[in-house]
Image (cartoon, helix red, strand yellow):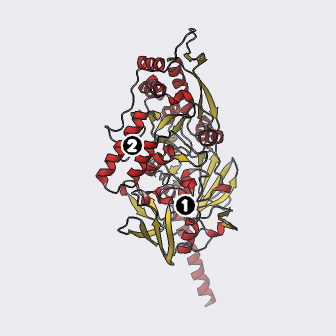
Amino acid sequence: MRKHTSIVTAILAFLMLFASACSGGSQSQPSSDGAERKKELVVAISGDGQMDRFDAASYNGPHPIYKMIYEGFVEDGGAEGILPSLATEWSVAEDGRTYTFKLRQGVKFSDGTDFDADAVIFNLNRWVNNKLHAALTSVNVESMEAVDKYTVKMVFTNQAYPILTELSFPRPVRFLSPSSIQAVEGDPMGKFTKPVGTGPWMLESYKKDQEFVLVPNPYYWGGKPKLDRIVFKVIPEGQARIMALQSGEVDIIGGDLLGKIPLDSIEALKKDSSITVYNDQTMSSQFIIFNQDNPVFQDKNVRLAFNYAINKESMVSKLLNGIGQAADGLNQYSVPYVTKENNQWYKYDKPKAKQLLEQAGFKDTNGDGIVEKDGKPLEISFVLTTDMFPEWKPMCEFIQSELLGIGVKANLNVLDANAYADAQVKSRKFDILIQRTSSDSWLPHSDLLQFFTIFNANNKARVWYDERLVESINETLQTMDEKKRQENYDKVFKIMHDEVVCIPLYYPVTTFAVSSRVQGFKTGVNGYAPIEWSQLDIAAN
């Protein structure tokens, strides 16, 4: 009997070895010393992940990482519309304000704790009715309750058509484990300790300003990732990211919110047989804002002159290698409610720009090429950053030259990402500043709120404040009839045009460059989910 058992054991051992040798796909590969080698992929990212502050109810850290770690009630499915996520179904009452969500059962956070209605209410209490989130119609909540363990009811203060869309945003409407928050008496936010979500990935390690590492969430309720580890390596400079890809230090570079590829390098990357370049459309656009506190820009003729001064077509064709398009108006035509009729801005007309400055009282009286008014030359500070958008430096140098052509001296001030954000939102230390719109589901409604309504951080609008414009935006967001809503958006965009609230510049595309050892690469549904991370794999050696 003992001899028979030994033979069976030997046969089983052989079959297990044979099965292991024949298996492929996402199985970890053995290394030369016989140890299991993890399937690891490295992605370049332009800035620190801020994992020590990566609270689901905050705006800290990179947008795309939120959707890897945290989930919400619903998800943006792109062309498929709003899809179920942690809510499997929902209903809206006749009042248009009462939403009831049925939660997915059996879901756990990555620390093994349960996701249920109590966890949802805990999270909602941390962001509803908070002025920090004033760009969301869904932040204003009259009441909410856990009806039972897997049912949540929310009554919003006002009906608003974008509520479900906002609940798909990468932040702040996603759910983290209550165990990751230390209670602080009198403060519903508590103290954040670590990012713990229900998403397919979880944080393994973090080295500030160097890298952070994500691994699969062992409790994830959906499909499992094929990789064992994704390392996000911080490389702030665009050319350095390209060199890291070419040397094999990283596997993927690019993406609007991860770290864009310098446009003048794309053709060379396409010729590299070890690299594949992927292009995809984006709803985002780039534009210049005026500092409304500067008396110079309170004159509409000056704002018009700056618009007419810039030859955007030439900028795109000659400077940006024809990649993307010169902007007609603030938003791309893929943005809902944007049409050819309501999105026309001001075309290049240098003589008209000079004429408008003269009408505003600016003349070059001493022949130095710079116009003056009341003896003061028209000299301005032009703020930008290149950390995430390397093309902004040559673009702004081009615009600087165009403004000089009408007698305006623009001094470029290149800031790192943190200083740029501070200048943009808090200190307001700029005269003009280049920035981008949001992307995808944020457009157009949330951008209109965050750009043109009073911002809590400094009691100013981020782009431009006009009372009539704000009233029109609010009316539009509460319009449930589709036809009437389009009419209201037409009115909103007309006010923006007539008041010359900014300078539309450029409609970019998003580009990735990927090592040939990467398999299964596919761009995601939007800029906040730029890559189908769980489909990525590594080619066998």
The correct choice, above or below, for 175 with respect to 148 in the image is: above
Amino acid type, callout 1: Asn
Q: Is residue 483 left or right of residue 334?
A: left
Q: Which mark is residue 129?
A: 1
Q: Residue furthest bottom?
A: 1
Whether 287 is drawn above or below 232: the answer is above
Locate residue 94, reporting x and y percent.
35, 68
Quadrant occupied by the N terminus: bottom right
How far apart are labels 1 and 2 at the CA level?
Answer: 26 Å
Query: In the drawing, does residue 359 fall left or right of residue 488?
Result: right
Q: Residue at x 54, y 54 (%)?
A: 133
Q: Which residue corresponds to the image point at 54% horizontal and 27% vertical from the top-left?
A: 296
Where is residue 403 shown, x and y percent of the image? Answer: 51, 21
Q: Residue furthest top?
A: 367
Q: Nearer the viewer, residue 437 or 212?
A: 437
Location of residue 160 (image quadrant): bottom left
Crowding around mark 2 (Cα neighbors within 10 Å: few <14, some 14 to 19, many 20+) is many
Q: Residue at x 59, y 57 (%)?
A: 39
Q: Amino acid at mark 2?
A: Val
Of residues 362 and 422, the one nearer the viewer is: 362
> Which badge, 1 or 2, is on the more N-terminal residue?
1
Q: Image height check: is 133 above or below 513?
A: below
**Residue for badge 2:** 492
